């Protein structure tokens, strides 16, 4: 018998930064109940769907009690008795109820919470793992991009660049890739202490947030840490950057205040190109600002062998991703559920990326919860890459540990990195030498 949605309720809870966010519970016709929790970003893009907040004095305006109230008062009456297993139809109804292009009426936090809670309830009712309920193609374990050093809006240090991450692509299992990440994270901490840099706990996503003399120093330290931890930089473990350049772009210039200089788009591209030549960097996210389309086109033209990921640029939005493709901009998309506000729209972005030959990286937010939904979504989407943060802080580990469960208990395959790797770039030269 087909399942229908019977009840919805929502609650204001706290995220990993201690800020309010939403939990939604869905009840189905067979009595199943399940809930989902909504993440929240700090370095948000202008083109993201609207995250609705109360604006009352509670939590400095960041409360979500009105949002929670409307889940029951507005959405429930319009959704009650609808089939729960047709996610596309359910999400279309959510979009229709809100009725605005960016969900600014009732909030993408409300629509996403409902979308995810219903999907999870269906998986529980069917007694199947969530990724199977969400899956449209072949599920695969994603290669993780793991934050080791943090700057920008996520850390109290001085760096403008937001994330210095590792990509452990030279391993045959998720478990081995995570072991390497743990070693490199702790080795990086040792190196920072030994070098006399002040360490004040970890940043929002669990990476170290040290005071460093320059952004380049972070790359240098990270490369050293990979080697000192016992791995081959560029062959087993490479580097990914999330520049989050939107957040230090003003009046046509990129302001690297920690280094006392301002760069044009072309100078930023020069800087990134130089780093790719000197360090084992294989992926750069938001290397330029969200509306700097001309700069992005130049970046894409010049760094063709590097994975260039649009986060603030695309905001998990098929219209912006299509625009990017038309303008020969970037070659990968970051996928964040709450940038768009429903599961269907999120999976549609993954499908479009596949169609136009872009890679996709499913991503958490800097404000997260203990919900592991993202791990199942990444597997179901077939994206092949995931970015959750570091391997400290339990809101991150909820997802990593879920991936470990899926690897061990669901016997999913770990097919490896889907973007260009330095090892594969170098292969052509080695083959020539061997011949
Ligand atoms: P955010 O950071 O969740 O604060 O936006 C993550 C990212 O920029 O990728
Ligand atoms: Zn980003």
Image (tube, rainbow, N blue to C red):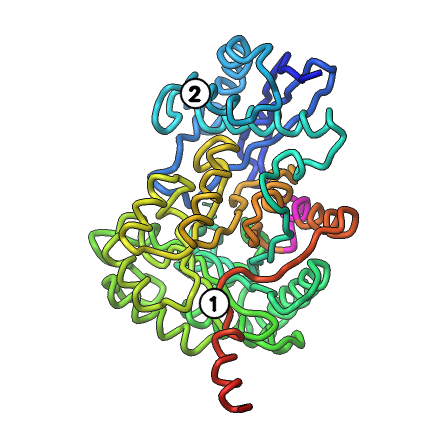
Which residue is at the front of the view, 309 or 214?
A: 309
Q: Residue at x 56, y 64 (%)?
A: 166
Q: Can residue 201 be seen in this view?
A: no
344 up-or-down from 368: above or below: above
**Image quarter (top left, top right, bottom left or bottom right) of the N terminus:** top right
Question: Within the magenta stretch, is there residue 254?
Answer: no
| Badge 2 element | loop
Which residue is at the front of the view, 13 or 278?
A: 278
Residue 314 lies in quadrant? top left
* Label 1 CA crowd tier, 10 Å (few <14, some 14–19, many 20+): many
What residue does disc 2 label? 106
Q: Is mark 2 within 8 Å of ligand 1?
A: no
Q: Where is residue 138 in the image (x, y as percent from the top left)?
A: 62, 47
Q: Which mark is residue 282?
A: 1
Q: Nearer the observer, disc 1 or disc 2?
A: 1
Mark 1 and mark 2 lie on one chain; the one further toward the N terminus is: 2
Q: Which residue is drawn at 57% across and 24% down?
A: 86
Q: Position of residue 212 (x, y in %)?
A: 46, 67
Q: What stretch is highlighted in magenta?
A: 391-399
């Amino acid at each position: 018998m087909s399942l229908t949605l019977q009840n919805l309720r929502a609650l204001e809870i706290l995220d990993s930064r201690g800020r309010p966010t939403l939990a939604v519970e869905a009840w189905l016709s067979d009595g199943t109940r399940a809930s989902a929790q909504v993440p929240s970003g700090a370095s948000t893009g202008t083109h993201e769907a609207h995250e609705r907040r109360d604006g009352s004095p509670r939590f400095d305006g960041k409360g979500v009690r009105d949002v929670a109230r409307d889940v029951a008062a507005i959405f429930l009456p319009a959704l009650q008795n609808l089939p729960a297993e047709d996610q596309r139809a359910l999400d279309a109804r959510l979009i229709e109820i809100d009725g605005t292009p960016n969900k600014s009426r009732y909030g993408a936090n409300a629509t996403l919470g409902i979308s995810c809670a219903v999907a999870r309830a269906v998986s529980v009712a069917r007694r199947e793992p969530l990724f199977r309920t969400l899956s449209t193609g072949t599920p695969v374990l994603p290669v993780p991009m793991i934050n080791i050093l943090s700057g920008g809006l996520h850390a109290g240090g001085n760096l403008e660049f937001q994330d210095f991450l590792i990509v452990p692509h030279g391993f045959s299992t998720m478990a081995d890739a995570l072991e390497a990440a743990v070693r490199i994270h702790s080795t990086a901490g040792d190196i920072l202490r030994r070098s006399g840099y002040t360490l004040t706990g970890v940043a929002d996503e669990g990476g170290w947030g040290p005071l460093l003399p320059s952004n380049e120093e972070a790359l240098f330290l990270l490369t050293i840490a990979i080697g000192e931890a016992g791995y081959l930089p560029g062959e087993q473990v490479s580097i990914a950057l999330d520049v989050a350049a939107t957040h230090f772009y003003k009046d046509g210039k990129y302001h690297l205040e920690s280094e006392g200089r301002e760069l044009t788009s072309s100078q930023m591209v020069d800087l990134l190109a130089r780093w790719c030549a000197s360090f084992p960097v294989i992926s750069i996210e938001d290397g330029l600002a969200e509306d700097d389309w001309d700069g992005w086109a130049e970046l894409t033209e010049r760094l063709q062998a590097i994975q260039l990921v649009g986060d603030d640029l695309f905001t998990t939005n098929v219209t912006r991703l299509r625009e990017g493709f038309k303008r020969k901009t970037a070659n990968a998309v970051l996928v964040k559920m709450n940038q768009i506000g429903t599961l269907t729209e999120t999976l549609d972005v993954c499908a479009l990326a596949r169609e136009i030959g872009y890679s996709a990286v499913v991503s958490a937010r800097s404000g997260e919860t203990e919900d592991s939904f993202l791990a199942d979504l990444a597997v179901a989407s077939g994206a092949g890459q995931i970015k959750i943060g570091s391997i400290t802080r339990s809101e991150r580990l909820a997802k990593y540990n879920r991936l470990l469960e899926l690897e061990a208990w669901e016997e999913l395959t770990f097919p490896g990195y889907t973007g260009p790797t330095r090892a594969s770039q170098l292969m052509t030269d080695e083959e020539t030498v061997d011949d």
